[in-house]
Amino acid sequence: MKRRFEQRVAKIASSLLSDWPYVSSSRALRASVSIFLLLFPLLGRAEVASVVMRPPQAKAWIGQRVPFFVELRARGSFSGTASFDLPQIPGTILIKIGSPLVSSQDLEGESWFVQTHEFALFSQRSGMLAVPAFPVRFANRDGFTGPATDVQAQSPGFTVEIQRPPGSEHIGFFITTESLDVTETWDPTPGPAELGAIFKRTIIQRAPQIPGMALAPVPTTAPDGIRIYPGEAATNDKLERGDFLGERSETITYLMQKSGTLDVPALNFVWWNPKTEELQSKTFPAVTFEIATPPATAAAELATATHQAWLWLLVAASAVCLFAWQRRRLAVWGSHYWMTLNPPDRVAARKLLRACRDHDAAAAASAWIAWRNTQTVSFQPTPELCASVLEMQRFVFGPATTHSWRGDDLARAFIKFVAAIKTPLIRESASALPNLNA
């Protein structure tokens, strides 16, 4: 398209110059006029951005859906699916809504293909919220055919002021919606029950313009004697004729572990209606369970408890007498088996891994030296282990720095090295370093 435009301009310029004798007499002047006529239509033309942010409204409420849009522009048709690396903001959810809207626009005298993507922001923190710029990747073709060209760009950021509704200072998780429909069902119906009985309670929340993942989680509080097993929250959002309805369903299991009268406290759901600017709520009353004790259970429990008490008393007395009689021999045996189970190299290795897990460079340096001193056979650390140890020592013994040290690399290299030399030095549990890849 651009080449055809340039050829047309050059043809017009050549036609004009052929009819202008004075200009035709000078090649240099003729070339200058041709270049001027070629570039004149481009003068003052603004560059069209490939990614445009349509920011949201300046102010919003806590828990309110704040929509914003990102436009992707290309001279040719789009190929594939665009991807967005949405930023992680504490107390805030950023999600993409639906499928993009494809259209065309005339920008700076040219026709552009435009994809409009809708996003929604939900924040639980009041104050000025800054959403930084985030990467965008998409592909487009030259016209309708040809190979696709990858485009990497940045979507501009924006700021929005999140306001807390008056009177909601004491409320934790909070949403803003014009209506909230909450229902509950019990299976079986609460009432008199026996010890060990199980009751399931299902809470379903529905709200317009709010996705299920942004609705408040159901509180799981119960008195002593009732054990609670929260279930996984399920969402079922629906979009019908442009109306968005979010749904969140949670099932809570109550296990009766104690006889007597047990009360499950009331559930209160509070939200802010932005249309009426009022706090609204719905409360499910407290539920009472009468848990009966089987007649023979009380006597059996008392007899069992008495028997166990005498048994433990006899075991404790025997242990005290044995310790008093053989205390020296027991001390020697205990020390011997303790050293067998916990030799110095294994203790030093555990201290090193613990220091790496806590990201404590000084403790890691001491533990590394202690472990090396326990090795009676010379060994050659791997390049990975040498590099990790050197990095740790530079942090501990080098000049002061504002950067923090992380022990993930050192722990990983140390474990690989010990496994390679097939020396059973470490008996840490699998959870000793839970976040090596964090």
Image: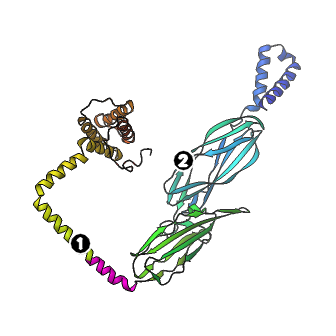
What's the distance in space between the residues labelled 1 and 2, CA to CA? 67 Å
Say what secondary structure mark 1 lies in: helix
Image coords of residue 238 (percent x, y): 67, 63
Q: For residue 260, what is the image quadrant?
A: bottom left
**Eyeballing the image, is 381 above or below 195?**
above
Helix, strand or loop at disc 2? loop
Say which mark, if any, is on residue 22: none
Specify whether 179 is left or right of 43: left
Task: Please name which of the two marks, 1 or 2, marks the residue nearer to the observer.
Answer: 1
Q: Position of residue 321 (x, y in %)?
A: 13, 65
Viewer-nearest residue: 274 or 148: 148
The residue at which mark 2 appears reads as 132
Of all residues, the one furthest to the bottom in this rendering is: 295
In magenta, the rendered stretch is: 292-306
Query: Mark 1 and 2 residues: CB-CB less than 8 Å, in contact?
Result: no
x, y (%) of residue 227? 43, 72
**Quadrant (top left/top right/bottom left/bottom right) for the N terminus:** top right
Residue 73 placement: quadrant: top right
For the stretch drawn in magenta, what is the main secondary structure? helix
In reply to whether residue 303 is colored magenta, the answer given is yes
Left or right of 321 on screen, residue 394: right
Q: Along the polypeptide, which appears first: circle 1 or circle 2?
A: 2
Residue 96 visible from this viewpoint: yes
x and y percentages locating residue 170 in the rendered image: 45, 70
Indicate which disc residue 311 carries: 1
Of residues 61 and 29, the one nearer the viewer is 61
- Residue at point 37% right, 84% down? 296
Three-letter code, disc 2? Pro
Q: Is residue 420 above or below residue 130?
A: above
